[in-house]
Image (cartoon, rainbow, N blue to C red):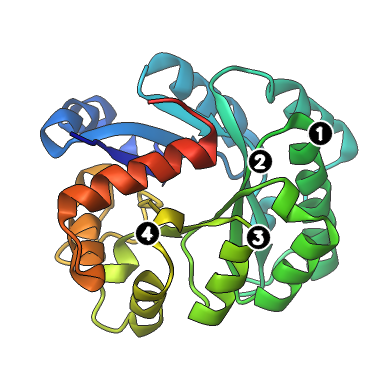
Amino acid sequence: MGMIFETHAHYNDEAFRDDLDSIFARFPEKRIGRVVNIASDLDSIGECLDLAHRYPFMYCALGIHPSDSAPLTDELLEEIRGKLSDPRVVAVGEIGLDYYWDTPDREIQKHWFEEQLEMARQADLPVVIHSREAAQDTMRLMQDHRAEEIGGVVHCYSYSLELAKEFVKMGFFIGIGGVVTFKNARKLKEVAAGIPIDHIVLETDSPYLAPVPFRGKRNSSLYLPYVVDAIAQIKGMDPEEVISRTEENAERLYRLRS
């Protein structure tokens, strides 16, 4: 029987400061098997590594989110590069472009996205891509850097089905989380219906984006069964099959064996 693989969480976030162990203690009852905790800024690099070493079910991705990329320098990137050989590190991320918040300057975001794509290539690791209101530039830079040779996931996917199919053609996975349970999430439901189950992975982006009926509250991996049920309903699949197929996909994405 498969276990739910959480491909994107931020358990180093302040929101979990007081009750992290009690959340993790409930993972078996909700069939949460493995978690990849994702770095986003310079402070979180060490925090994510620490968590991944403390909990045997946890791995991490190391990288700098576009909105946090202003302080980056070549020297700091070298420091991150030196940590990528740690056996608990399974990806470079989250990296990308965010034109919704639109800070720092787009040229700075693009520069560090490109640098981190190449860092992932050199480290032979997949990438976790954050892209918000920046579809065209994200795709262009991925094509420029032959991202199909690097591999990875477009997390918290928010674009069209047509674009999702282009990412899938590049061999990328599409990360789907609590938004798929929202009534107004027509586009994401179309994506879930229209791309093969072989390219979907489950995620929460905890503590953000909790599914219905917890929308607006703190999210955690404990709510992933609601995402499983939504995808199963949309695709006309048994929830057990969604769990086992997405677990296999996550293992392929992060190059792990079960």
Q: Distance between the residues labelled 2 and 1?
A: 14 Å
| Label 3 vs label 1, nearer the camera | 3
Q: Establish if 170 lies above or below 42.
A: below
Q: In the rendering, which numbered label is found on residue 197?
A: 4
Q: Distance between the residues labelled 4 and 3?
A: 16 Å
Amino acid at circle 2: Gly
Q: Distance between the residues labelled 3 and 1?
A: 19 Å
Sequence-first tag of 2 and 1: 2
Left or right of 210? Residue 111 is right
Tell whether label 1 touches label 2 (CB within 8 Å). Answer: no
Q: Find residue 228 and report its horizontal and vertical position in percent.
A: 23, 56
Sequence-first tag of 1 and 4: 1
Label 2 SS: loop
Q: Find residue 251 and report its horizontal and vertical position in percent.
A: 45, 36
Sequence-first tag of 3 and 1: 1
Q: Find residue 56 and report its horizontal and vertical position in percent.
A: 37, 17
Q: Name the residue under label 2.
A: 63
- The one nearer the camera, 28 or 42, is 28
Q: Name the residue under label 3.
A: 170
Q: Is residue 51 at least partly visible in the picture? A: yes
Label 1 SS: helix
Amino acid at circle 3: Met
Q: How far apart are marks 2 and 4 (CA)?
A: 27 Å
Tell whether label 4 touches label 2 (CB within 8 Å). Answer: no
Amino acid at circle 4: Ile
| Crowd class of label 1 (few under 14; some 14 to 19; many from 20; radius 10 Å) | few
Sequence-first tag of 3 and 2: 2
Q: Name the residue under label 1.
A: 122
Sequence-first tag of 4 and 3: 3
- The one nearer the camera, 65 or 160, is 160
